[in-house]
Each structure stands twice: as C-alpha cells, then as structure tokens.
Amino acid sequence: MKTTVFTIVIATSFFSGFAFKSVLTNEHLNETSNMKKVTGIGGIFFKCKDPEKVREWYAQNLGLNTNPYGSVFEWYQGADPSKKGHTQWSPFNENTKYFEPSEKEFMINYRVDDLEVLVKELENSGVTVLDKIETYDYGKFVHILDVEGNKIELWEPNDIEYEKLGKELGSKTTK
C-alpha cells in the first residue's frame, strides 16, 4: 500500500511538473511570437568615391539593372509567394551625411511589420530611436542605432506602391 501511494505521488509530481513546464514554455513562445521583428533585408547602402561609376561597373560586370539610386532586387515573399518584395542596393557618395551619427561606411535597411509597435518596443528596451517615423506612399521609415552605434533604417514597406514608383521612374528591377 505504501509503495502504491508513493508511486502515485511520484507520478503525479512528475506529470504536474511536466504540465507546468509546458504552460511556461508555451507562454514564452507566445510572448516571442507577438514581438515585432525584422522580416527581411530592405536595402544595403554603402559609401564610395564615385557612385555613378560604381553603378555602371555593377551594371556592366554583374548585370544589375541600375538607376540613379542604385538597383532594386525583386523577389517573392516566402509567406505568400504571390506577393512581390523588393530590396534596394544603393552606393552613396563617400561624403554623405545620411549615415550619421554612425561613422561606418555602410547602413542596412531592414523590412519590418508594424513599425509603430516595433518603435514602442525598441524605446521600452532602451534602444536609441534617432527620428520620428516618416510615411510615404511606398512605406514608413525610421532610424535607430544598434549596440555599436551603427545606424539602421527600418522600413515597413508598401511593395505595391514601391513597384509603381519604380515603373513611373522607368526603372527595371534586378531579378
């Protein structure tokens, strides 16, 4: 009888602990999945001595379809392969102030969902937000600094309007 009661107590403790751990793990997963996050690379920006010459070189040697701003890569979104996505590649003049306050020669633009919520989460985490969210037909933008002072551009894209703008400018995408 003592052995049976002991076995029941051990088994109950084990399963209670397992159930409690599952609840905690699921709560943690729900918190993580609700967090706003980066969904992809929106652009790669870098400094160079002669942006026009660099654009021409990449067009001639690597086949990029370039325009005065660089090149736009067109791709289809994995979550919904019927939707197009875009990534901007842009050489900037070496004297640009656009990357400031970062002293780096590059800046990465990340695609995000729900920029307003993400900015609130970043501010609550103590991340330096450099400016107010700017809204254009083709998306919303804001700049932040990472832990090493690198300026990062966050973009909540409107890919339909972005593609329309490219067509209005007579630009071709790189596929």
Image (cartoon, helix red, strand yellow):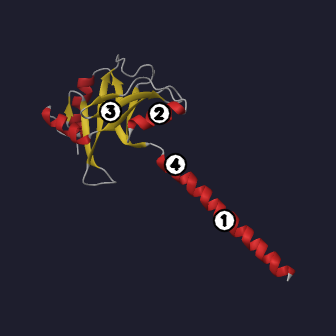
Viewer-proximal residue among 54 and 106? 106
Q: Which residue is drawn at 74% across and 73% down?
A: 11
* Callout 4: SS: helix
Q: Name the residue under label 2.
A: 120
Say which amino acid is labelled 4.
Answer: Thr
Q: Earlier in the sequence, mark 3 or mark 2?
A: 2
Give the class, few, some or many, for how many residues have Cα within 10 Å of label 2's Cα (few <14, many ≥20): some
Local secondary structure at mark 1: helix
One can see residue 159 in this view: yes
Residue at 24% in and 33% down: 137
> Given the image, on which type of amino acid does mark 1 rest?
Phe
Q: Residue 18 carries which label?
A: 1
Disc 3 packing (10 Å; few <14; some 14–19; many ≥20): some
Marks 3 and 4 sit apart, C-alpha to C-alpha, by 24 Å
* Residue at the far bottom in the pictured view: 1
Q: Name the residue nearer the viewer: 35 or 68.
A: 35
Q: Give the Cα distance between marks 3 and 2.
A: 15 Å
Q: How many marks?
A: 4
**Disc 1 or 2, which lies upstream in sequence?**
1
Q: Is mark 2 on a helix, strand or loop?
A: helix
Front tag of 3 and 2:
2
